[in-house]
Image (cartoon, helix red, strand yellow):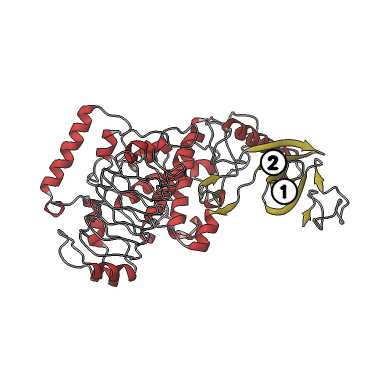
Amino acid sequence: MSYCFNPTCAHPKNLSSSQRCNSCGSPLLLRDRYQIIKRLGQGGFGATFVAVDEVLPGEPCCVIKQLRPSGTAPHILQMARDLFEREAKTLGKIGNHPHIPRLLDYFEEETQFYLVQEYISGATLQQEVKKTGFYSEAGVKQFLTEILPLLQYIHDLKVIHRDIKPANLIRRTQDARLVLIDFGAVKNQVSQIPPNQSGQTALTAYAIGTPGFAPPEQMAMRPVYSSDIYALGVTCIYLLTGKTPKDIPYNPTTGEMMWEQMVNMSGHLTTVLKKMLEVSIRNRYQSASDVLRAMGMEPYLDSLAKGLIVKTETDSRDKIQNRPENPGNLSSNPTSGSNDGVAQLAAAIRARRAKSPETSGLRAGRNQNKQLISKPSSAANSDLSGSQINRRLNSETLLKAYLKGRRDFACFNISLLNLEGADLSGTNFHSAQLRKTNLQGANLENTDFGRASLMQTNLRDANLTKAYLSHADLEGADLRGADLSYAYISQANLRGTNLCGANLTGAKVTDEQLALAKINWLTVRPNGKRGFL
């Protein structure tokens, strides 16, 4: 199939062997090299197509955006041209980033404007959710660790995307990494609108962005960098619930989305998302690095210039601040502070824990305890009744609760259990005790083991793809043959961990961590190569 580029053509579909359109007679080969094979979509300012480049060897696919404004008024046409020029300049400024489509060509032909980009094979997150279902909490954390550094990289270049949403994030087929597309709505800097006779310019005559994902200030044509943070927060809610903003009720007084009752996750991530979704710019996170810092993932910001991790640094202040023990009345987003402030914070945490008997001997925070106690809404929870101090589980009770839909076992004691071959994917084991537990061959995909104790745990041949293991204690654990592809292992203790034959493709882990573990020539390192470091 070959499509006609003529925007006024009544019947643009043609046979692939045709040289000219059978309907309007227009040439079907753009610039004597690009032939459209599929139409991807059409918006107010243009249409998007998949084309083949017949000039290059192998005739690779590319994406072509064609200027196609919804009106013919001069100011509409000028706005569309400016948007296209802005997108091309922005893509050129960003350069060759692994998570952004490359700009291949940009030209005007017969008063039509065309933008040619790298073709990204894969499904959007919107398509992914509709096909495979909602994300778990661990899945959302993994998503944020990948997209937040990219967002910070863009903002450091003085660029605001202004249209972050599930439909503009593609999971690339070849490596399962996320790619941010559609820079047609970008704003190159934060600035006040210069006054003129009408109080508007052609570019600001329309609010750019997607309603519901764009925050109030953006719809009022005054976007700031944290406008993208808000849109990213709305995207997380979609990933967790499958609901678009129009399907989520709003508080008529504050204008905030009322989403908390639709999800079941830890108090810590709930707090982070609420701050990302603050209607007030002043109360919202100001940068992507602030969000990562609040989540305890700040080391992932290293080497943003290339979008890859090359080293890991530990900020002791942030480690203390972001532990689950952090009392709710302390700030979750410190941006500055002295050593005295850190000491005061640590003392406050110790004093709070010493006064709280229900947290004695546990690594859990007060907020997480309250959440687990206050949500016995399902039959699964009735099976977990008993002491909230010890919170000890046996294998039968755990598996029965999981089958009934329970996914939150944060802070529980699950040590010494036999869970060989169990399916526990998407489960929250944050800060749980799993010492010497037998999880050989278990399905633990997208499971949250953040800050959990997994000392001497049997995880041989387990599926830990995209698992969250930040700050977990894996000393002496058996991970021979385990699949840890794209797992987040940053700052986990790997001393004596057996990783012989394990698959670490794309995993977030440093060479320093791996130097403490046992590996062999069958171990697949994060770069995809086998063997020793």
> Marks 1 and 2: in contact by CB < 8 Å?
yes
Q: Identify the residue at horizontal 52%, vertical 62% (top origin).
A: 130
Locate residue 469, reporting x and y percent: 33, 48
Q: Which residue is mark 1?
A: 51
In this rendered view, identify the residue nearer to me: 34 or 22. Answer: 34
Mark seen at residue 346:
none
Question: Could you tell me if residue 278 is visible in this image?
Answer: no
Q: Identify the residue at horizontal 44%, vertical 47% (top origin).
A: 505
Locate residue 172, reporting x and y percent: 55, 49
Locate residue 8, reporting x and y percent: 81, 51
In this rendered view, identify the residue nearer to me: 368 or 177. Answer: 177
Relative to 15, residue 46 above or below:
above
Q: Amino acid at mark 2?
A: Val
Q: Which residue is mark 2?
A: 116
Relative to 520, residue 308 above or below:
above
Locate residue 140, reporting x and y percent: 41, 52
Report helix, strand or loop for mark 1. strand
Mark 2: few/some/many CA within 10 Å (<14, 14-19, 20+): many
Horizontal side, residue 97 vs residue 302: left or right: right
Report helix, strand or loop for mark 2. strand
Quadrant for residue 493, please give it.
Answer: top left
In the rendered structure, which disc, 2 or 1, sits on the residue that comes first in sequence? 1
Question: Could you tell me if residue 38 is visible in this image?
Answer: yes
